[in-house]
Image: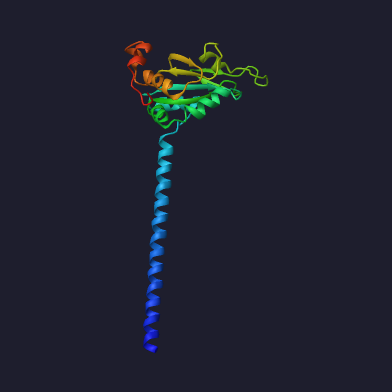
């Protein structure tokens, strides 16, 4: 009996140790997997969301690396289509990645109340306490045609390339970004480029 009990205890002890080791391995594997998954998700998220800048930040970035064009999204707090553009189009990871690689993307509230300095001049909102009062820089960038959302494309030297207005889904917006991002505006009219463009969403 004693020998049987002793052998039985050893077997039981071995079983417990085996279970503990197995549980530890599973726990370690699970934690490692989750940590890696979180790391991967973080990397994917960082690479596939638009890194929006302020106008001032884009100017400074351009001084250090003047190889990208400037894309300015002019919006207002009351503009429903601006919010839809953010949620449905700018959130697309493929579009976002291209935007980050080829542009300095700027978010610009057209009714902001602060002062913005650009090319030696100061631009302000003349009536910041008035409802829907337009900032001078937004007015200038849009040539006085106040429609939201509107997107201003500037070249590397802050020269105007074009103004595009309205809500766009991802598929029709992609060729617009590529037309200027790939410098095709110097090669052909947009209508011709659009016909031959092979994007990711057609």
Protein image colouring: rainbow
Q: Quadrant of residue 9?
A: bottom left
Residue at horizontal 37 percent and vertical 21 percent from the top? 178
Image coordinates of residue 134 in percent, x first then y, are 60, 17
Q: Measured along the vertical axis of the image, is residue 145 above or below residue 73?
A: above
Depth check, front residue: 51 or 60: 51
Q: Measured along the vertical axis of the image, is residue 190 above or below residue 87?
A: above
Image coordinates of residue 106 in percent, x first then y, are 48, 25
Count the marks: how many? 0
Image coordinates of residue 174 in percent, x first then y, are 40, 22
Q: Is residue 154 left or right of residue 196?
A: right
Image coordinates of residue 191 in percent, x first then y, are 37, 11
Q: Measured along the vertical axis of the image, is residue 8 above or below residue 199?
A: below
**Quadrant the C terminus occupies:** top left
Residue at horizontal 42 percent and vertical 20 percent from the top? 172
**Quadrant the N terminus occupies:** bottom left
Q: Quadrant of residue 113?
A: top right
């Amino acid at each position: 009996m004693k020998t049987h009990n002793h052998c039985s205890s050893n077997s039981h002890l071995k079983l417990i140790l085996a279970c503990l080791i197995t549980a530890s391995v599973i726990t370690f594997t699970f934690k490692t997997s989750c940590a890696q998954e979180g790391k991967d998700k973080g990397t994917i998220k960082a690479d596939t969301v638009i890194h929006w800048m302020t106008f001032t930040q884009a100017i400074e970035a351009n001084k250090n690396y003047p190889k990208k064009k400037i894309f300015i999204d002019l919006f207002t707090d009351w503009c429903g289509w601006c919010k839809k553009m953010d949620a449905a189009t700018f959130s697309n990871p493929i579009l976002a990645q291209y935007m980050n690689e080829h542009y300095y993307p700027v978010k610009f509230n057209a009714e902001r109340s602060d002062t913005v300095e650009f090319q030696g001049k100061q631009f302000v909102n003349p009536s910041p306490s008035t409802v829907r009062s337009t900032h001078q820089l937004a007015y200038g960038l849009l040539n006085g045609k106040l429609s939201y959302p509107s997107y201003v494309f500037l070249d590397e030297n802050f020269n105007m390339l074009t103004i595009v207005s309205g809500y766009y889904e991802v598929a029709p917006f992609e060729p617009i970004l590529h037309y200027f991002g790939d410098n095709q505006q110097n090669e052909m009219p947009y209508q011709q480029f659009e016909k031959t463009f092979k994007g990711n969403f057609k």
